[in-house]
Image: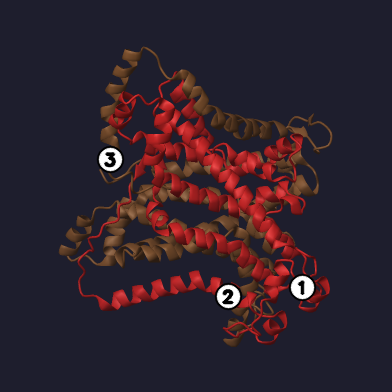
Chain colours: A brown, B red
Amino acid sequence: MTIASSSPPSRLPAGGAAEARSKPRTRRTEVGDNQGDGRLAAVFIAPALLGFVVFLLWPTLRGIYLSFTRFNLLTPAEWVGLDNYVRMVNDPIFWDSLWVTVEYVVINIGVQTVAALAMAVLLQRLTQSAMLRGIVLTPYLMSNVVAGLVWLWILDTQLGIGNEIISALGADRIPFLADETWAIPTIALINVWRHVGYTALLLFAGLQAIPNDMYEAARVDGASEWRMFWRITMPLLRPVLAVVLIMTVIGSFQVFDTVAVTTAGGPANATNVLQYYIYGSAFGRFQFGYASAMSVALLVVLSAITVLQYRLTRAGRTDLG
Amino acid sequence: MATVTTTTSTTLRPVRRRFPFGRAAAWTVMGLIILITLLPFYWILRTALSTNAGLSADPTNPLPVDLTTSGFQRALGMQSAEEAVKQGGAGGGLDFWRYLLNSVLVSTLITGCQIFFSAMAAYAFSRLRWRGRDKVFGLFLAGMMVPAIFTLLPNFVLIKQLHLIDTLLGIALPTMFMTPFAVFFLRQFFMNIPQEVEEAALLDGAGKIKIFFRVVLPMASTPIITLGVLTYITSWNDYFWPLMVSYSDSSRVLTVALAVFRAQTPATGVDWSGLMAATLIAALPMLVLFACFARRIVSSIGFTGIK
């Protein structure tokens, strides 16, 4: 999640300047008092630090540790070295679920990015209406569970309005979530419905940072909207697009909720995405060690993707001076 | 480090050439997008107000078939088991009032504590001077790189050891103290408050604690509210973690309850009317919350790049 409030308290000067000015002053105050705020800071930081250590740092280390153990939650974890990893590499279901997950991510991110980009450009070039932006955000307010259930109903083979329309058009009904070929694309598109508006608003914020006179100048030169999109919008939006891509890809790999309420991994493991398999291993078969090993694998994949994507898109650099 | 790009909306509209065909096409696409975005919401309402018999007899009717509140009665546990079964329900006796209350309690606990503790930490990271500050903050930033989902399994083991399984506190605890993002986000805003304001308060004899409550928090109320609403929505919609922790009615939140409702499919087919009524109960509070703050939230969804 990334948000940035647009309106810092209005009576304040721009942040950067205030910060730059504040530094020497603080140092002076410090010399005057001859002491920092150590004790007070300890009190202020204590709850957050406690939460950080107990519920983030410690579980991260423990998750890695558990991946080297056999652990069923009832008896103490037993060190087994690389056994879980060896098993994972030789587990066809693991590879299958990794493949299914990749298929999901490609469809989900592919469609979502193009659609969000189109929406963002439309929202910027067509109208600046805040109400329209509010409307495209509404699916994002629903939980994945709600989104999954609604589309499960709309796409129901017998009674769903989606299939009624398909049938009225003279085509055969499609068992969207009950068919091995259709299930993953359908789940991917359901999640596009929920997330595309939010992604579009992130990109929209990026578009707002592109100076309007660039478009003015291009228009004077007789450039079309299409040409301006490719020559101005895309190059200047690249850094924003890169970070949004990294964020959404990481989120997409963690798909679970929608699968759990619509297909429960079926039919015939066709939607057994990695996180669903991990959950089943831990809570269905009580193999917490093996589940942890697969979680570590997912963590490694996500880190690798982040680094790779960052490099490929040169996310750190912007063409905008 | 981090940059926060402001998203002040330009009121200046670009001057356009005469290109009515393209504009018309663009508006058509926009209209289509809005339709796909909003139609499922109407369909929830239409289905929730229909009877199951009506739904199968007349699946394409754009209006509720045999207008009724029976679906809502079933979802809220106000219908006897026999009556529910007769209406195409499972008769499992789910009480969505209870789950609604649980969801409100969990989300309120998480949001209130998380924002307050994160604000305290952000204050220490931005306005207080102490040794090791940047190192500890660096640690928090590094924490943002760990996908939340990775900590779920070990956190479950921890919550089990604390004997907090199947309690609302157990659901709230892991995100109650902070998220690295909340700390990072609020720190950005606290740093923008000019030193002069703080110094003036110091001269008036206010202590640093008083400054936090009387100066910093009020001046950053806009980002705090934005963050609060988004945190509330996120915890309200969370499914995976409560699914692990909650086993019975005492700690069941709406998302988990919806999945249970769906799993209780009676032999006659899914109780779509009841399920959509329950879905509406789960979704409506967030729609109302959003409607209250929409303007502020929409204009503050921006872009935070971390380099």
**What residue does disc 1 label?**
B89
Chain ID at mark 3: A
Count up the numbered dots.
3
Quick check: B187 above or below B69?
above
Helix, strand, or loop for circle 2?
Answer: helix
Q: Residue furthest front?
A: B204
Q: Disc 1 residue type?
A: Gly
The label shown at residue A12 is 3
Which quadrant of the figure has residue A213? bottom left
Q: Residue furthest left?
A: A220
Helix, strand, or loop for circle 1?
Answer: loop
Q: Disc 3 residue type?
A: Leu
**What residue does disc 2 label?**
B43
Left or right of residue A288: residue A197? left
Helix, strand, or loop for circle 3?
Answer: loop
Quick check: A130 above or below A302?
below
Residue A49 in the image: x percent, y percent? 55, 29
Q: Disc 2 residue type?
A: Trp
Q: Residue furthest top?
A: A34
Front residue of this view, candidates B102 and B253: B102
N-terminal-most mark, 2 or 1? 2
Chain ID at mark 2: B
Does residue A295 show up? Answer: yes
